[in-house]
Amino acid sequence: MDTNSKDFLDSLKKGSEEAFTLLYNRFNLSLCSYAYRILNNDNDAKEVVHNTFCKIWDNRKTIEINESLKSYLYKSVYNNCISHLRKRKQFAKFAEQGLADLYFDRIIQNPHAELRIIDSETRKIILAAIDELPKRCREIFVKCKIDGLSYPEVAEDLQISVKTVEAQMSIALRRLRKHLDWLLIMIIG
Amino acid sequence: MHMYKNSGRNTLIARVLSGRATKEEILAFSEWIKDYGNELYFERFKQMWHVSVDSEYRRVNSSFGNSSRLIGYIRASKRRYLLKRVSYISYSAAAAVILLFGVYALANLGRQSQKPDLSALNYINDSVKVEFDNGNIVHKVVDSANNITNIEKVLEEKSAELFMKSSASGDKAIKVYNSITTPPGERVVMALPDGSKVYLTSNSYLRYPTQFDKDKREVTLTGRAYFEVKKSTAPFIVNTSDMNIEVLGTSFDVESRYIGSNTFVILVEGSVKVMADGKTRVIYPDEQISLHRLTREMTVKNVDSKLLTMWKDGVLVVQGQSFDELVENISSWYGVEIINLTTVSNRERFNGRFDREDIQVAIEAVSISAKIKYRVHEGKLVLEDR
């Protein structure tokens, strides 16, 4: 069933459990992932998404959706994340230095950017390239490039030598560069 | 080299995006991004970062989430039984039950008049015990169950006395240890010889020397304690039966008991090194490392460290606990004996917080959420199926 159709929206409004289950199964994981990247906390991310679904259920009769259901979901999750964020330590670190705007404008992924990237070619290419890395290699790459850990930190974390981390990283970079030349030539360094 | 130069800034960006950046790094980043070229670079990196994290997230969570929790919510709301959602439970298999706390819950259900009388409840009468190595024992009786007792004064007086004795007999070189034992229902806060602060929750034991060594500060813990360690070049080491924790200066929460399946450390700020079974792990703020006592499996997850360490401020926080754990927790926190005759499934998980509430409010909340009833029998609290 097309979750963007008018019929689907109508069955949501009528309170069809089936429609809500379908909506949940289709979007829950993607929305949790999105919320996680805003909040950097898995439990909170899942809570926010769950609450978003519950809120939609509570307001199903009066809800006004003038765009696609998908973008409505992403915007709702975004808004709920933002109100959650204001209570958090990481946000306070920006706010105390007068950098709240920088945080909201630049750091946080807004729903438009998220929706744009979800279906993009770029995403497919990056995913394919990362997926092709051997498991250990990917793990180290993720720790360095995604979590922002230094080589010694990764070495300590995984109980391996710094030399191994360096070696694995250079394998990862060599392989990725082959696929992602145009995007990563500067980023990956 | 070009590669090396990039690596530093990439680390900085990754730390900013993953919420790990310190204030200094945030400031450095805010200056760096003012440059137009850097801004473009950042946008590209960010794209790459989001896609990679997304893919990792899906990999880890692929088995997570069926719609049962949402359906549960939908059905409950249809029965006009509107639970207030408190927090999410990550155990996907377990049905989540949410505790309703406070006056809100009571007012909504309007059953105040039928509440069982708790006045006949016995409170466990042990007091905080401070023990010195010469066998001297000091009991400090406190009557208010919710406040943390500051025992610094008792310690100061006694240590001074002891110090006089030991210097009089000239055996300064002998290391003297103090130990603190807290009974159920009591919590204490105190300062260690180096000025570090320790909060000790109920049912816990802490042993430390009256004077730390020059090269290390070592204490032994059974139970749960929150440490605010004074910065120093001498590492601060907490020994527990399952793991050793080493830090230089930071705030963290440790629980290690002989009962219970996990030993864990929650980090609030700084970084700590956790050593167990010959392995070493480093954790970062808002991370919790758990060691399963039987499987010896070590896991690290992200948590809200501020929330989970609120017990030191007199707030009992329950997150993802089974009914047995919840009962044990309440028994220990309020210092009452509880007999659990219910058949509440151990797959159910409970969340919630008790903001300095008395036991009646707490137990009322539990009985509403878990659909049980309670009464007092021979001074003990008895829980039964409704």
Image (tube, rainbow, N blue to C red):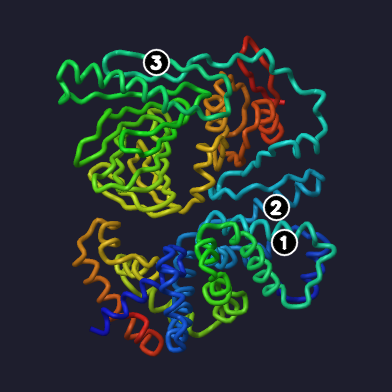
Q: Position of residue B153 (x, y in %)?
A: 42, 25
Above or below B139: residue B254: below
Which mark is nearer the camera, 1 or 3?
3
Dot 3: what SS? strand
Which mark is nearer the camera, 3 or 2?
3
Count residues near mark 2 (Cα–Cα under 10 Å), then give few for <14, some for 14-19, many for 20+.
Answer: some
Left/right placement of residue A98 relative to residue A20 reads: left
| Label placed on residue B71 | 2
Above or below B87: residue B58: below
Above or below B326: residue B137: above
Dot 1: what SS? helix
Q: Name the residue under label 1.
A: A20
Count residues near mark 3 (Cα–Cα under 10 Å), then give few for <14, some for 14-19, many for 20+.
Answer: some
Mark 1 to mark 3 CA distance (whole Å) = 62 Å
For the residue pair B376 and A98, the one nearer the viewer reads as: A98
Q: Position of residue A102 (x, y in %)?
A: 54, 74
Q: Which chain letter matches label 1? A: A
Residues at discs 2 and 1 in contact (Cβ within 8 Å): yes
Mark 2 to mark 1 CA distance (whole Å) = 8 Å
The kind of residue tagged 3 is Val
Dot 2: what SS? helix
**Quarter-wise, where is residue B103 in the image?**
top right
Residues at discs 3 and 2 in contact (Cβ within 8 Å): no
Q: Where is residue A133 in the image (x, y as percent from the top left)?
A: 33, 73
For the residue pair B261 and B101, the one nearer the viewer reads as: B101
Labels 3 and 2: the sequence-earlier one:
2
**Quarter-wise, where is residue A53 in the image?**
bottom right
Left/right placement of residue B77 relative to residue B10 reads: right
Q: Work out which quarter of the rendered image holds the C terminus of chain B and state it.
A: top right
**Residue pictured at 45% horizontal, 53% vertical:** B286
